[in-house]
Amino acid sequence: MPDYIEAYTHNQVAVDFLLDGFSDKLGDNRLGDDLPTLVEAEDFQRLSRTLQSFNAFYAMGRLSNEIRHSNYIAFLLSPTENHEFGARLLHRLFPVFAGTGPDDASDVADIVVMREYDVVDEETRDNIGRLDLLAYDRRKCRVGVVEVKVGSKLGPQQLERYRGWVDRYFCAADDDICWDGNLIYLTPSHGLSEAAPIIPYRIDTVSTRDVAEDQYWTARSFGDISAIFDAFLDEEREAGRNNPALDSLEQYIIYLGHHICPREGCLAPMARTIAEVHGPALRRLREARRDLREQAVCALTSHFAAIGLQLKPKRGGHFLSERKSVVDLVPIEAAFGWQDDVFDDLRFSFNLFDAIPCITVETRTNDNERCRKWREILNYKVTDRKPGKRVLTWKFALPSPINPYPVTSENIGGLVTHVALRIAQVDAAFLRKLKA
């Protein structure tokens, strides 16, 4: 196992990507049981280089904010920007602008692409929302819309409200003119085995809209978008067109494949092959990763005990499972003065190796009143007041904005020292309020 711990330490980014995204693809090939065969494999080394290469989108921090994605996509699609793509990429995402052929395509001078467009009811002046991306050609009467979701969910009738505004706004000038459009709803994954054909949308003021919204909106995943961008990138370079905008697009495709849609992105085929061929070696690396992480967790046991929390082992005696990094915490009944209903109402957990390292306190049921009660006791200010269980999230400030702290045998001591201070701080700031 020491060899595997050392191998994990030196290949952490690639191994984490494979284990976190493709554990269900690990094969049983006996030839894949050899550690050197894995780490020296050309595919593994290429994956590792790609994941660790410079990426401007990684440098910007977590891109869970959909506006960052929609702004960049809007830039790529706008023919008037300085990327030199013209309308070639726009036609791939919105076929409506390509028309029925070259002679019917929208003139690039007539195409307007707008980002973060506030939509307002023209009669009542009520705010309807904000379209992430809006493109239109008034001369050819064509329109394209993209609504992006990364970490959030749709609001009430959000797609219906946006589509209704499109109907009213683009036919307001002349009821006799009909517009053609493509409406796209973009999410990390849509659950389909392959991308569905784009849905043509006819915009007028007389048609009855009495079917579900998925009959009007085309579901697209970031994996679909990544494939469209990847094919475009290849064709541009085959045509001899090379510029910084294409380099930027390549980095974005890799970023999507690493952080937004790993199972559907550009790295997925290579990752599946590695997982299938080298399954036994990756399973041993998974055990090594858990053992390494468990060293850090075990070193924090006394620090949690000092504030009245005990780490709860899982089946088999480990605090961590091979696939999940959440550790359950149990209040220690004696000597710490916990309020009686803490034991019945609240659940404590600790997560050091996920995207957001934190201590979490949540109610045991989705009870709004209980949530409100405990948030008030903790005096914990939250922006999201929707129904839920979470009443406290105390984050650990660790160096990487996206990946878990890179844990090695050499830096466990420093990691434990840093987290121990934060454990004491969460007790002083919040948890003491749960004690009599």
Image (cartoon, rainbow, N blue to C red):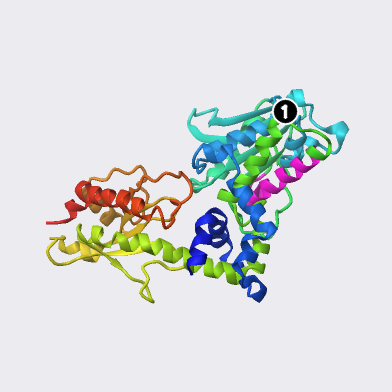
Is residue 224 found inside the magenta-colored segment of the image?
Answer: yes
| Quadrant where the image shows the C terminus | bottom left
Q: Position of residue 199 (x, y in %)?
A: 72, 47
Determine whether, in the image, residue 388 is placed left or right of residue 231: left
Q: Front-most of 42 and 334?
A: 42
Residue hosting label 1 = 79
Q: Is residue 405 above or below residue 38?
A: above
Q: Residue at x 43, y 55 (%)?
A: 407
Residue at 59 percent across and 31 percent down: it is: 115
Looking at the rendering, the stretch of residues picked out in magenta corresponds to: 208-236
- Mark 1 belongs to which amino acid? Pro
Closer-to-camera residue (129/164): 129
Q: Residue 355: image x %, image y %?
A: 45, 51
Magenta segment, prevailing SS (helix, strand or loop)? helix
Classify residue 342 as left or right of residue 271: left
- Identify the secondary structure beneath mark 1: loop
Would you place residue 192 above or below residue 287 in this image? above
Q: Quadrant of residue 300?
A: bottom left
> For the point 71% across and 35% down, which residue is it?
246
Q: Residue furthest top?
A: 109
Tell me residue 401's x, y (percent): 46, 43
Is residue 325 on the magenta stretch? Answer: no
Q: Is residue 360 left or right of residue 160?
A: left
